[in-house]
Amino acid sequence: MRLCFQLNGRPVEIECEAADTLAELLRNHLNLTGTKVSCEVQVCGACTVLVGGLPVSSCTLLAYEVRDKNVVTIEGLAQPDGTLHPIQQAFIDDFAFQCGFCTPGMILAAKALLDENPKPSEDDVIHYMDGNICRCTGYVPIVRAIQKAAETLKESKK
Amino acid sequence: MSEQKKTDFHVVNHSVPRRDGRAKVTGKALYVGDVKLTGMAYARVLRSPYGHAKIVSIDASRAAARPGVIAFLTGDNLGGLNPYYGHAVKDHPLVAIEKVRYAGEPVAAVVAEDERAAFEALEFIDVRYEELKPVLTPKEALEKGAPLLHERKFEAGALRGFEGDVTAGRGTNICQEAHLRWGDVEAAFAKAAAVVEAEYYFPMAYAYAMEPYVAIAEVNENGVTIYSSAQHPFMVRHDLTTVFNLPVSQIRLIVPFVGGGYGSKSYTKIEPLVAACAWKAKRPVKLQLSVEEAMLTTRSDDALTWMRTAVDSNGKIIARQAKIYMNTGAYAENSPLVCEKATNRCVGPYAIANVQIDTYSIYTNTVPASSYRGFGCAQVTMAGESQIDELAAKIGKDPYEFRLMNVAHPSEEFFPKMRAFDGNLKQDLEIVAQAIHWKEPRSKGRGRSIGCSVSDAGAYPLTSTVVRVHADGSVSIMTGSTELGQGSHTIIPQIAAEELGVPFENVRVVASDTAITPYDRSTGASRTTTLMGRAVLEASREAIEQMARMAADVLKRAADEIEVIKGGVQCGEARLTWSEVISRYYGLPDGEVIGRAYIRKSGDFAKLPVFWETACTGVEVSVDEETGRIRMEKLATAGDVGLAINPALAEGQDIGAATMGMGIGLFEELVYEGSQLVNGSLLDYRVPRFSDLPRDVKLQLVENRDGVGPYGAKGGGEAALNSMPANIANAVYDAAGVRIRQAPLTPEKVWRALKEKKAEGRKQ
């Protein structure tokens, strides 16, 4: 079937099968392999992408469900000139990843959080991010990075 | 090496940003699962529903006729291959042959044009089984007349890694045993002032590397090429040489970024299976396991430890004896080495005059156990460090003071025939005690503990590297160390940049391609910083020596007139950068200088272990008396790492390891009902989440430069995990007065213990 949607700010028109998940479509048909698949049961958050600004697990969302919607993946976060999004930069600055497999989903979930709540407390971050698992970092540097990114975003809006 | 004592570092000992940072935050970092080869086909695996059964017949003809199916693989169509592999014991068939030994074992594979076609064809494979009685615990497996998992005798793997004889395949279900003794334990226990004795259990745990096992293989006239998520590509290469009967030069392993390992990706996993599929299909083949399948591939050994420890009337530990039964599952994998390491690590970081440890690694019809971060140390430290607190309580001593009094001292030969102790645990203990406010009163429902451990770390010292200095002064380092997230590809160029005096940005790493990068035995046992780090340091210095000689040649001066300065040489008024030395030497602004280093069991590395990896961790927990739920409120670690090449990365290892250890202490456990794993999915296997993190975390590094690594560095990837389950058990005792000797300390166990204690209180 024919599927049309907005992907990282550009229109996409592509053939897909009814059984294709969004993660399969992104990774296998659109070669956007930044989206990672891990648990496949909506527990780990590694495959998180933004659909209409909200974080969703692309491993269990049928691709057809994003018809006419706006999808943002990790590949769409930096500026066209390569400038990183403040969350991406904060993740580097604060060593908020090790193996990096959870990182794309983690950063997109963090973006959804900061879009909704520009000044989250530590509790807010922990509560919102609880659906994303990281096996390497013990989470502490991720919380710090998200709060720093919030500061940077606040400064840039002044 | 006197230059090792330099102190004015410009790159090393700084938290420079990760080299892989940009790639990993933009989604550009390449993992095996992201690789697509031209003409690539896809494999899926059919797995055994039974724990122990004979394969009576297997017929894949209906599957082979399915649309899109290219080839299939079963135990009876492997003609031409040597299907048994294993670096320690060659007991593991790449797909089940004649019988299955655990539920979930690969029985057949289908290769098709796409994954869905391969998956859909699996149900058309007809397998007839004849069920055999399974043995599920070491106790059952050791009973007289217990069914045998392995009937035949095995060859020892060529890269064994353990010192003892191969026990597997000698007519029992014993996979390996290890024995350690010195002094006279019976006499010591007889004259002891106090003794504690009990049994402890450490569960089966799943490492959950978020990237499940994945490999792509191609077999052609050049040999076998495999892209894999393997931690140790050179060890896997060796297993493949025997499967395909090919020389080392015709097996190539390429490892891009690895999405977490924690030991679970060490040694050979799915590579022989996917290579055999590619050989059948005559196409490149990819096999991507799901997390559910990864859980059926490797786990940690669970361990039942009986232990007793004794003190004299001065509070000095005088004896320790233990008997450890490790459940190694259906195949040996790395468990013979885990068995040996658990035996050594059971002694703990104490100088004990009388020791006897007997360890048995037992085959059962469960998922094969292998390396897991900590390598046997966590299993036995659950017993050892619980027992230190129990003993302190028995003789009325503060457990922190009791440890201070008994830990090995710097340079003490606390373990016969091994390297003298190269850490400072007294200092570590003091740091941790202060960080968790040990001496201050506890609030209600809170308890604290301090734990430590010591591991004979670093594995075997066999590592080589090449440092190439190019004519423009930039540098390429060829390293066989894999980047699992620990940051090796950041610290390796830091060391070369430090030595060569060139900007960190200009030093790049070429990694983990066995056809290109020199041999490095493994990326595990916390060894990379110490061994590869030292190799990079020496190869850089060798390149510098060559360039100094070249400078003498081009300047027409004696070699001893050339002085090495930062980034080049000086001779009288003349100063040349490395770029100028190389360009003038070759007469063109081109060419390169190649520095090499070989590390072997000699010189600084003659004595094992390469270094003692020490853990020292403190926690404060809260116990909810109504529900039995425990929370870790505070965590403190002291990373005794000699010198942190990159302090932020070193701290990252400590908190990461501590968090995994917390998971095992609180809730992680693979659960079997009969021969079926019943929580084999992330829905049911609980790992630590954001909401579990302690709110008060203090990570500290102890840098006494007492290691044999570069500038006195030692490794530190595993330590903080090892002490954590015992830390939690001891803190729960401190908080609520109940002693729990089985990890994980689930709310149910804690609640039952509290209820029992109340009932006893009422009786009295």
Image (cartoon, helix red, strand yellow):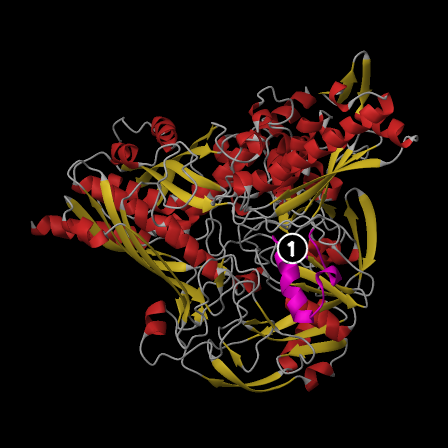
Q: Left or right? Give the position of B529 relative to B315.
A: right
Residue visible at 84% across and 31% down?
Answer: B471
Residue B306 higher or lower than B279, as above or below: above
Q: Residue furthest left?
A: B764
> Does the stretch in magenta take in B244?
yes
Measured from the top left, where is residue B112 in percent x and y?
74, 72
Quarter occupied by residue B274: bottom right
Closer to the camera in the image, B666 or B363: B363
Query: How many numbered marks, from 0 up?
Result: 1
Q: Is residue B284 among the parts visible in the rendering?
A: no
Q: Which residues are magenta?
A: B228-255
For residue B111, side relative to residue A12 (left or right): left
The correct choice, above or below, for B573 with respect to B380 in the image is above
| Vertical comparison of B332 with B425: above or below | below
Quadrant where the image shows the N terminus of chain B = top right
Q: Residue furthest top?
A: B573
From where the camera sits, is residue B83 visible?
Answer: yes
Q: Is residue B709 magenta?
A: no
State the SS at label 1: helix
| Front residue (pair B216, B606) | B606
The amino acid on which the numbered mark 1 sits, given as a three-letter code, is Pro
- The chain under label 1 reads B
Quarter residue B538 falls in: top right
Residue B702 location (% of width, % of height)? 46, 28
Q: Please tell me which residue lies in front, A15 or B571.
A: B571
Q: Which residue is mark 1?
A: B233
* Image position, residue B271 (x, y; %): 65, 64
B78 relative position to A41: left or right: right
Residue B704 placed where, x, y %?
47, 27
Name the one closer to the observer, B146 or B170.
B170
